[in-house]
Amino acid sequence: MPLGERGGWERSESRYCGVETDFSDDVPSLLSFHISTGGFDYVLAPLMNPSYRPSLVEGNGSDTQVLPVSGSDLVLAPSQWSSHVVGKISSWIDLDSEDEVLRKDSETTLKQEISWATHLSLQACLLPTPKGTSCANYARCVNQILQGLTSLQLWLRVPLVKSDGGSADATSEGQNDSWELWNSFRLLCEHDSKLSVALDVMSTLPSEASLGRWMGESVRAAIISTDSFLTNARGYPCLSKRHQKLVAGFFDHAAQVVVSGNPVHNLPKASNSNTEGTQRHPLRSYLDYVAYLFQKMESLPEQERIELGYRDFLQAPLQPLMDNLEAQTYETFERDSVKYIQYQRAVAKALVDRVPDEKASEITTVLMVVGAGRGPLVRASLQAAEETDRKLKVYAVEKNPNAVVTLHNLVKLEGWEGIVTIISCDMRFWTAPEQADILVSELLGSFGDNELSPECLDGAQRFLKPDGISIPSSYTSFIQPVTAVKLYNDVKAHKDLAHFETAYVVKLHSVAKLAPSQSVFTFTHPNFSTKANNQRYKKLRFNLPSDAGSALVHGFAGYFDSVLYKDVHLGIEPTTATPNMFSWFPIFFPLRKPVEVHPDSPLEVHFWRCCGSSKVWYEWAVSSPTPSPIHNTNGRSYWVGL
């Protein structure tokens, strides 16, 4: 029984709840009890009798011996094995033990159980937590296994602990930071894209900053012990506010919940029986509470639902200077009413500043929309003129001949013939018949300057009056270090350098933002600069919060914030983002090799914006704590059209 249908399709992976069970050689009865009676969606069950040791089998582990597995594969249909059973690898295995017999038994058993799970077509298997301080041999064996897997996913069980005492809920002394354990293991596995983590959620939790790291990792399950539940006023299990927030975060990132342990709540007698009078499943109240947490999550807004398919999906940024946009692209951006409301506000303020009230009927303001597209900025400007009761003359400059057709039809349809003049030309090469009071453009990209707004406006500002107003008047790019396992693995899957030298537009979702963003480049208009001045360099230093613990940086999220005019802003930088605007997704700059960062060791980053005679490109590198190569040297990935 899925946790809930309301909004469930938005979180299709997380709406299933499992239960951890003991070994049983009667799997049909196990499923009947936990799924049919208990209401859980699947069992997390051992595949092999826990008393089995290869070295104790007569014949010294001969291939003729029958393994003590959980019944024949015929006891369930393949679809039942696949959808209702997650295999649990024997918890006793220790592949890094100093005991050679135990080590060899562990390796043999691990391979046997994975082979059996593959034969059963299971979707996933849970690997036990590494024991001791070293996990090199364990990781080596898992890495070998991962190379041969096609559909089976492996989840490494990791306790969610952190021992630095960074929060009021600090864990007991002697426990390692669980992220360090996970990171050590997965770095040893070359094929880590098939490896995920299942977190054991304890009754106490690390700090918020420490927990935040996991939102960028491949967390597939949160295993919550019944000991972690509190008791509400009615005697039923519940979770603390911090636990609730954590579980909601896991739901939102497609992680499933698994209930583990024996019941520890003495529920009222009436609640222990269902309406037919039969005994309820002993863990049903825990499942009901998890379902309650899922169902009370707010449904995604309409725009978020539209963007679901773009979450963590890498896209090449638009290059409107080189390529003519298609009608569908225009239509997508034109639906963003918030953006054009902000432009209308900025133009209205500029018109009032240019023309005092007493001369509103006498003076006509010349406004040029450079990069007019299909006319939304023209419309916003005319609405601003109507709102402020100012007279306006508009030049709509557009290089895309297809969009010009739409502009001509729009002018006729709206009766703008005496107000709007359409110019079919690249703004940089147009000779204007008069100078403009206001210059309006929409060339901002995800990074502010990646659609070559500086170069375009440098070429266009020659026909702006010396005291003229540019909208936008300035824009600033920002970067932020992120953990983004999915994005990194998607880039890595291409198996070439070129994709690590590329900046991508992406709707960020499964990422952990490790430190506040910092500004990189700022451009101001009009500034009457030359293109050579658009070459920029910035060195930045990021510090992780002291209670965060170490983290792995897979790349940098890029944003922008722009000042359209005076106090009218537009942007996607997280702390100042324009609410409900969807025209721009962030940009992602990947690193060839992730960099591990510690709270006491700053991350030093270098960014360059380079300009050639016919192209613009970015270069980026890390110099500390571990130097990286300079990415995209000589502009292997670039923006063109200059």
Image (spheres, grey):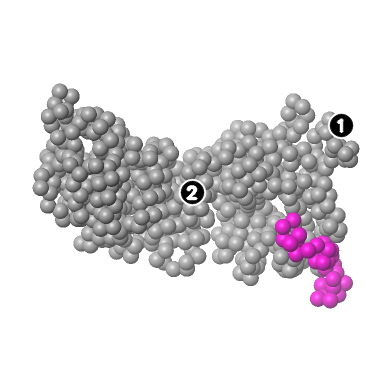
Question: For the C terminus, which image quadrant?
Answer: bottom left
Q: Residue at x 18, y 54 (%)?
A: 428
Residue at which label 1 appears:
269
Q: Which residue has dot 2 on it?
A: 307
Q: Secondary structure at mark 1?
A: helix
What residue lies at 51% left-to-right and 40% top-to-bottom?
301
Is 567 drawn above or below residue 477 in the view shown?
above
Q: Does 575 appear above or below 8?
A: above
The kind of residue on which mark 2 rests is Glu
Of discs 2 and 1, which sits in the foreground?
2
Highlighted magenta segment, given as a residue range? 55-84
> Residue 546, how many percent across, how many down?
50, 39
Horizontal and vertical percent position of residue 505: 41, 53
Q: Residues within 10 Å of mark 1 (few under 14, many from 20)?
A: few
Q: Is residue 108 above or below residue 167?
A: below
Q: Nearer the viewer, residue 642 or 363?
A: 363
